[in-house]
Image (cartoon, rainbow, N blue to C red):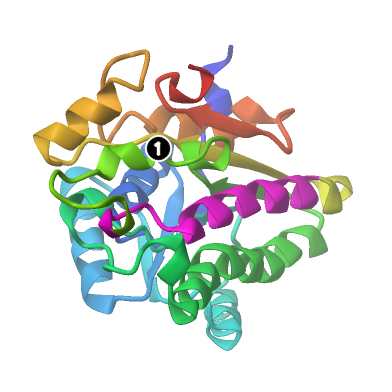
Amino acid sequence: MRLNNFNLNGKTALITGSAGLLGIEHAAALIECGAQVVLTDISGAALELAQSSLEDDLTGAKIIAKVMDVSNQKNVMETWASLQAQRVRIDILVNNAAIDPKVERGGILENSRLENFPLDQWEKQIAVGLTGAFLCSQVFGAAMAKDNKGGVILNIASDLSVCSPDQRLYNKEGLTPNLQRVKPVTYSVIKTGLIGLTRYLATYWADKGVRCNALSPGGVFTNQDDEFVRRLSSLIPLGRMASRGEYRSAMQFLCSDASSYLNGQNIVMDGGRSVW
């Protein structure tokens, strides 16, 4: 393997939801390979913190920050137009933005169960996680195809794109079954939908040199409750959750010419959970 295939000098990558835990890691991975990154997020304050963190950790990082709501078509188009005015071509699009309800931290709604799941939450979460990926692909992917220079679209899915949530992970003693909190239906539907979008895009602009793949990470350890970590780790052949930086090399591979003949695939990195 030629290591220069990982070189992203002269390339610009736009990452949605880049102020989040993995969004920052994705940005760092691509900066390490020489890419300029466009950080986008709905929160301006979080975006500033993410940019500062990356600039502190990575000397010479080339970063542009744009507040963008992926679920708002007009806003996505305005962001594209703004980058065009700055003569910035997007070579890599990472559809990372999502709403991920954290069941194990008690942050999920009491009515997370399917029988009572609110329609407005269904629509909001799908608007961000799935419609947002569609809109960004529609705008930035079309631009990649139009000038015949090609590009890469990478959808960030999840191990729950290939298996169902194990709701036993979230069980709390003393609660009856109908009161137990669960991972909502939206997360599985969105992540599975992203794989369908990946396959569609992989063939749609292939003749224009635009490749599309998906990365499906497993759970990342971020000091979750000990019992939750124990339960989840017991479902993973490697016996542990991922560390936050363990997906960087996969990002570098999938967004560079190192994967130039990979198209339409879902790369599942879950420590083996989905094959057990």
Q: Residue at x 70, y 68 (%)?
A: 138
Q: Residue at x 46, y 46 (%)?
A: 35
Q: Residue at x 45, y 19 (%)?
A: 272
Q: Nearer the viewer, residue 141 or 134?
A: 134
- Confirm whether the magenta stretch covers residue 181: yes
Q: Is 30 placed above or below 3 here? A: below
Instruction: Give the farthest residue toward the bottom.
Output: 74
Magenta-drawn segment: 179-202
Query: x%, y% of residue 70?
Result: 51, 73
Query: x%, y% of residue 218?
Result: 40, 34
Residue 58 visible, this orientation: yes
Residue 255 visible, this orientation: no
Instruction: Give the farthest residue toward the right.
Output: 207
103 to the left or right of 31: left
Q: Is 236 placed above or below 23 here? A: above
Mark 1 belongs to which amino acid?
Asp
Mark 1 neighbour density, 10 Å: few (under 14) some (14–19) many (20 or more): few
Local secondary structure at mark 1: loop
Image quarter of the N terminus = top right
Query: x%, y% of residue 221?
Result: 22, 35
Q: Nearer the viewer, residue 132 or 193?
A: 193
- The secondary structure that dominates the magenta segment is helix
Mark 1 sits on what residue?
A: 166
Q: Nearer the viewer, residue 127 or 177?
A: 177
- Confirm whether the magenta stretch covers residue 17: no
133 to the left or right of 35: right
Q: Write down the quadrant of residue 181 in the picture.
A: bottom left
Query: x%, y% of residue 165?
Result: 44, 41
Q: Residue at x 30, y 61 (%)?
A: 19
21 to the left or right of 127: left
